[in-house]
Amino acid sequence: MTKKGYYFNKGGAPMKFRSIRSRLIQFMLLATTIPLLLSISITYIHTKETIKEQSLEENKHLIFQGKTNLGNYLDNVNKASLVVYTDTNFLRNLRKIPDDYRAVAEVYTMLQNIQNTVSGIERIYLHATQSNQSTLVTPATFPKRESHSEPYVSTRPFEKYTTSVEPTHKGHDYGFPPSPASYSERKVFTFHRTITNIPSEEVLGVLAIDVRLDAVAAICEQLFNKSNEQLLVVDQNSSIIYSGRDEQIGQKLEDSVLLEHIHQEQTSGSFENGGAMHVFEKMQTPYTEWTIIKRIPDATLYERANQLTQINTSIAVIALFVIVFGTLLISVRITEPIKRLTNYMNRIQAGQLNVDIDWNSRDETGIMFTRFRQMMDTINNLILREYRLELANKTNQLKALQAQINPHFLYNTLQSIGTLALQNNVPRIYALLSSLAKIMRYSMNNNDALVTLRDEAEHVKLYLDLQKERFDDQLEFSIELEPDTLQVPMPKMILQPLVENYFKHGMDTQDKQGRLDITSRMRPNGILEIIIENNGESIPSDELNRLNRQLERQQGGVPAEWTDEDGIGLHNVLMRLQLYTEHESVLYISNVKPQGVRITVEIHTQVRHAEENNE
């Protein structure tokens, strides 16, 4: 039954979604899209990490070079301030009275020399503590000198240090009247030095050197891109010496996470925070500790990776469209013949044996439809004649095998003789005749095509009892069947023909006692194994190989040519077993050492059970 044109399986799922076409489309899409997406993801992640490592390494080197340049610049300012100790007259001049114009001129000259030594010096302020004179030297104006009892207020916090650096601030004239050419609005940082009377600790004066931020900016601007990156130079007190943003210069750094990292003991490092990579390098000198911090946003850091991913994604999308289109086209072209052939089969199954099979193609599908059309023509021509004739032959053969001995008068005669034996007090003869009668009755009952292994074994035991009477002590036999095999159904008259071969071909009554054993067991997958083994004469190797080849041919469905010398009923037994189990059962013969023959029968019971359940 179908619903909305879809076929449904036993579980109720539409066959449309379980068809080869659907599975082929699903498989091809998964087999192409998943590796493609994985490739893009892995490429992006790998490229991102590689670029991150490269960028991090490059920026570390860059900032280290910037730290070196800044350190050299501050060292030059420091060395310039040390000139005051190289001229002994300068230290004496600091203590002289203000009216000594020669001393004043030498002080002016010394300060101007310091100013000219290093570029970027905005002004130099000197206060002599013993003469209470303050001096200011600027590049654009003449030196100024005034009497002050105390140094200017901005220099007082630094008097206790030999050298120190005041953070960036707006420039001022240290209490002197401003001049028209004064650049007091410029941002500067100040290098402070306390001048002592070496080797004593007597303070002779304080020196303050204002340095324009231009020199620091020139160095720092080479370390970052102002449009998408940020650079900070902060001192040990979190004051911002330099920033790419002018409004931050001279302010306190408020980023607690950033401060936590740079206040750790390591001199350099990197960390990620706030969607950006931060790289820092500490510059430690005897007079200050500056830290250079560079902030690189993730968008800038991974810009190349994102560009590469966008290119790969664009290519992947185009490829995906091509793959989907190609998958659908190929799937339809491959599965359309199968779908049409399935439709033909459904119509044939419904009884339309003369269905018109139409498919014209030069590829393998065309050959398949041609062969299918020829097969249906052959089936239509032979189905009534060949199939029914073959079925009748098999039925007649089966009945003929089961009724090899069918004279009712012989059975009645045996009963009469048995009665006479009892009348003459010969019970042994009666027992033997009863066994023979039971054998005949078993073989004459054609209504039971299938019997259990127990019934078949009892029949064989009766037959062996008669043979035992014939050979007396020259014959011993045993029948050992596992309990779980006794109720297994099987075709009738299977064991006796195989046992009878021993007495016809193999038993030797002159040299030793004959022995015949029958065993059974259940193997996995519902296979009943029966082994009939004797100690008679072994079969010659060439003859054994020929017999097994004949059996293999018959088991494979190939007609085999049997002779009377090939054993009693071997091919008939095998033929009936194959009819019973749909060619799944096997029979093979082997020699045993030192002497004897083993016949093994394997009956596939599950095939028969499945057939019965279907019926």
Image (cartoon, rainbow, N blue to C red):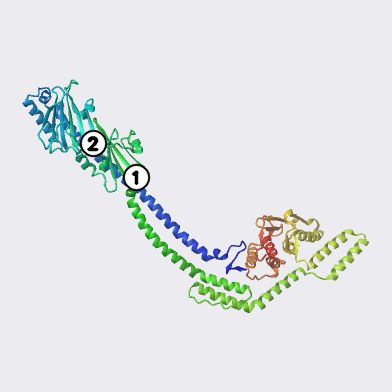
Camera-side residue: 241 or 437? 241
Give the left or right position of residue 306, taking residue 407 as reference: left
The quadrant of the image that shows the N terminus is bottom right
Query: Considering only vertical position in the picture, is 55 above or below 545?
Result: above
Camera-side residue: 303 or 452? 303
Q: Name the residue: 87% across, 59% down.
A: 428
Query: Alpha carbon of mark 1 to alpha carbon of mark 2: how far?
Result: 26 Å
Q: Name the residue: 51% across, 74% down.
A: 366
Q: Residue 97: x, y in percent?
A: 9, 22
Give the residue pinned by disc 2: 168
Does residue 301 appear in this view? Answer: yes
Q: Residue 417: x, y in percent?
A: 89, 65
Camera-side residue: 158 or 265? 158
Disc 1 marks which amino acid?
Ala
Query: Considering only vertical position in the picture, is 332 above or below 528?
Result: below
SS class, disc 2: strand
Disc 2 marks which amino acid?
Thr
Give the residue pinned by disc 1: 276
Mark 1 or 2: in front is: 2
Q: Residue 407: x, y in percent?
A: 82, 71
| Displayed quadrant of residue 369 | bottom right
For residue 1, the mark is none
| View extreme (left): residue | 102
| Displayed quadrant of residue 378 | bottom right
Using a 10 Å C-alpha cutoff, classify the residue at mark 2 as few (fewer than 14 neighbours), some (14 to 19) or many (20 or more).
many
Does residue 602 appear in this view? Answer: no
Using a 10 Å C-alpha cutoff, classify the residue at mark 1 as few (fewer than 14 neighbours), some (14 to 19) or many (20 or more).
some
